[in-house]
Amino acid sequence: MAPVSRALTIAGSDCSGGAGIQADLKTFHRFGVFGQSVVTAVVAENTVGVQGVLAVPPDFVSLQIASCLADVGADAIKTGMLVDAPTIRAVAAALRERGVDRLVVDPVMRAKGGASLIAPEAVQTLIDLIFPLALVVTPNVPEAEALVGGELRTEDDFRAAAEAIRRMGPRIVVMKGGHSPVNPPGESVDFAWDGTEWHAFSGPRAPDRNTHGTGCTFSAAIAALLARGVAPFPAIEVAKRFITEAIRTAPGLGSGHGPVNHWAAIDEPRG
């Protein structure tokens, strides 16, 4: 048994530090987990948008995964920006070879400013190869709409979409409420569905521009807590409280969508 919990992020690099592997590693550290990273793409971006993307060759992505898992190992893994179909196939093959019990998939499709972060034709490859490996998948509303091919306007829409996504392979689907049109006034509600239980996680909605990297940070918090042995639903609940506080106490950097506060303080389980 490792002396410290370990997590691995497989995602793009955000040079501005608010999203991607930088956000993931900060979040892992915040929860007392040793973090490792596999870079799928180098992204030139800041709080106002994406200026460029340089993909890492898929074979080298596979080599990074092998390097991490063959030596230090990982108690939980999360994926973020997976770029294109060849990269997704390489990641899926590497994860299947090693075996993954606690995989959190953030189906990253667009940056906060709207720039595409995955080739459109790669979405089906993500569904076919990565989703069946996942313990938790964390789509926001636009991502869920892209996955199921329809608009989400009511709570019944959310429930139907969650079940449709769960049938794609993941054991738990977290429907993030940040873009939801059915949130109660002043609240943001995330829904989680495992095929049996339906959970709602509510938090105050902060009317704040500082939301760069929220999806990365939220999914990384879930992965970190899973790495520590926390059960999935308690991990999701703590991650929801953490991202809510991280947005509320954001440092206010940059002139666009600023980063959240990755050292936000909350009460959390000892697992």
Image: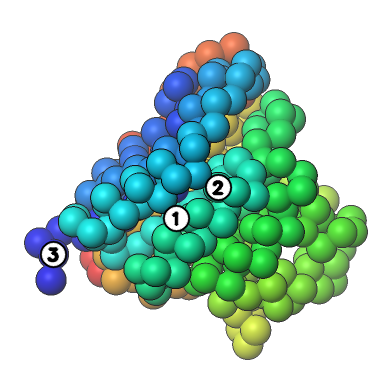
Which percent across, then down, holds residue 179? Answer: 74, 46
Which residue is outermost to the bottom?
Answer: 196
- Label pair 1/3, CB-CB below 8 angstroms: no
Task: Report the Cα–Cα distance between label 3 and label 2.
Answer: 29 Å
Give the vertical position of 50 relative to 38 (above or below).
above
Q: Earlier in the sequence, mark 1 or mark 2?
A: 1
User: Which residue appears at 54% of the width and 32% of the height?
Assistant: 55
Compared across the picture, whether 40 is left or right of 203 comes to left
Which percent across, then down, holds residue 184? Answer: 75, 55
Q: Residues within 10 Å of mark 3 (few under 14, many from 20)?
A: few
Q: Which residue is mark 1?
A: 78
Q: Which residue is mark 3?
A: 2
Q: Amino acid at mark 3?
A: Ala
Give the vertical position of 185 relative to 144 (above or below).
above
User: Which residue appears at 68% of the width and 58% of the height?
Assistant: 125
Q: Earlier in the sequence, mark 3 or mark 2?
A: 3
Q: Which residue is mark 2?
A: 87
Helix, strand or loop at label 3? It is: loop
Which percent across, then down, holds residue 268? Answer: 32, 59
Q: Amino acid at mark 2?
A: Thr
Q: Amino acid at mark 1?
A: Lys
Task: Report the Cα–Cα distance between label 1 and label 2.
Answer: 15 Å
Which percent across, then down, holds residue 50? Answer: 63, 21
State whether residue 3 appears in this view.
yes
